Image: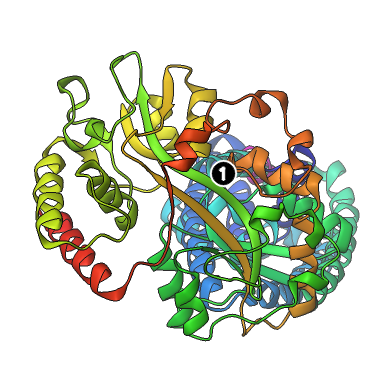
Amino acid sequence: MVTLNEWLIMAFYIALILITPGPTNTLLLSAGLQRGLNKSFHFVFAEAIGYILAISIWGFFLLSLAKIFPSIYQIAKLLSSIYVLWLAFKLWMLSLKMDYLTSHDSSLVKPLSGKNTNFVDITIATLLNPKSILFVSTIIPISAFNSVNVFLSSIIIFLMILIPIGSLWIFLGNIINSNKYLRKYIGVFLRMASTILILFSFLLVYSGIAKAENSLTLYNWQSYTSPELLKKFKKEYNIDILLLEYKSNEEALDGIQNGKLDADIVVVSDNFLPHWITAGLLKPINVNSLSNFKNIAHSWQRSSSDIKRNYGIPWSWGIVGIAVHTDTFNGDANTWKIILEPPKELSGTINVGSDMNELIYAAIRYHGGKICDSHPELLEKVRNTLLEAKKHWAAMDYGSVYMMASGKFKASIDWNGAAMRQRKINPHIQFSFPREGTLIFRDNLVILKKSKNYESAKLFLNFIMQPENAALNSAFHGYDSAIEGANTYLPSWMQNAPELNIPEQVLRNSDYSIDCPFFAREKYIDIWQQLLER
């Protein structure tokens, strides 16, 4: 979430950069000289089209590049500072030229107007304008290219600033051509703006160097990291955290193992942790030496995948279940039958998620099997059941909070925290625990062996083990933190949430998600591939 103060700061710097001379503003000035304000105003929309296209292209490109080369934003800031200094120089020289021209009326219009300006010229000039790179690398929040809502908000604010400033440049051209009295003040105004730009360029240099030396990249599940937590960490330690997100354990492991992206710290599910350890991707850490290790609940101080907690700490834990719209189906939802043999009311409206292990586990338990079961007859039943059930599903997508809350999906395999967030938006949604048995998941925060910011990474691990910080994170993603004392800091609506108050008998009938033996995984993958291809 971007705060009001951050939006205001962004708006100020957007205005500062937009008002400086450049290829687009030169054309707008020329249009004002040639045609006047009324006949040139529509060129502002050409500028808007060009910037929206350029910002979108550069924004998403830099975000993709940051996954491989996280320092790209710092480098872009340093390069941008040079560009801003160049703009300041051009602005100062323009101010001197304006001073000269205002005292030589006969030569005023010709040097500034140039050729006739048209809509296409302005659009192309703006699309190629280097200011777009400056906006996306320095001013517009990175989260804008991860969130549709933040992106649209950023664009709306950008346009609210661009339209009056673009009009101002056209108006300036009109003034130069028609109003002798106001001309003499234009040079002073431009020199003031030039001075502000010089200060801004030094700020960019400082910001780029400081972040390059003291920053972290966190790779985590989508919608699983509190923005407020990252802001609080930055405030306390002056360490920035770039957040990159994934949608599956397989995607995360593939991205790091094959060098598709770079990061310092990663959230890894317990059942996938052995793969990361075996591949030599993690840096061993002495978790017991961290001052806040004592805050981890006793039952979570060990993990089946990391017995002595040599590699990481708990991020959160939760349970898999079924979320259902009770205004559509008000029958028994405490069974995997809802997903595997759906009632007529829910057919065609079900999302089963994108996790192979959870879906196949559900079918195994539905047919009376156990976790990691690989009996041929049982798996044949599982295969047939899933292939038949798929006819009644709407999707196999990750992250259905808003799709469920909006009613696009009426039922889903979900996690208790996600279901709680859905219910907060739509009170008709109810989370159920399948009586056949279900999975408990545990996620861990680990440090990558290739991290160049090991001490800063350890600071962050220790930071999130403070109860109030763990609660801040839980209040965002909706899951228990495994940190003692954190619950007292949770909002009251969350403390009493039925999704988090899991009955003891449900826990006894559940399995912790683990890494199944190779021969079982191979059979599951075969079923999963058939399911995806069907």
How packed mark 1 is, by other alpha carbons closer than 10 Å (few <14, some 14-19, many 20 or more), is some
The residue that label 1 is drawn on is 155
Mark 1: secondary structure: helix
Residue type marked 1: Ile
At 42% across and 62% down in the image, what residue appears?
514
Image location of residue 62, percent across then percent down:
54, 68
Which residue range is magenta in the image?
160-168
Image location of residue 189, percent across then percent down:
87, 52
98 is higher (above) or lower (below) than 44: below
Which quadrant: the N terminus?
Answer: top right
At 40% across and 33% down in the image, what residue appears?
433
At 58% across and 71% down in the image, what residue appears?
306
* In front of the other: 337 or 36: 337
279 is higher (above) or lower (below) than 94: below
Colour option used: rainbow
Q: Is residue 223 magenta?
A: no
- Quarter of image, res 206: bottom right
- Quarter of image, res 239: bottom right
User: Predominant secondary structure in magenta?
Assistant: helix
442 is higher (above) or lower (below) than 285: above
Image location of residue 143, percent across then percent down:
60, 52
* In front of the other: 135 or 388: 388
At 53% across and 50% down in the image, what residue appears?
47
Q: Is residue 167 in sight in this rendering? A: no
Left or right: residue 345 versus residue 143 is left
Q: Is residue 164 magenta?
A: yes
Image location of residue 76, percent across then percent down:
66, 74
* In front of the other: 181 or 418: 418
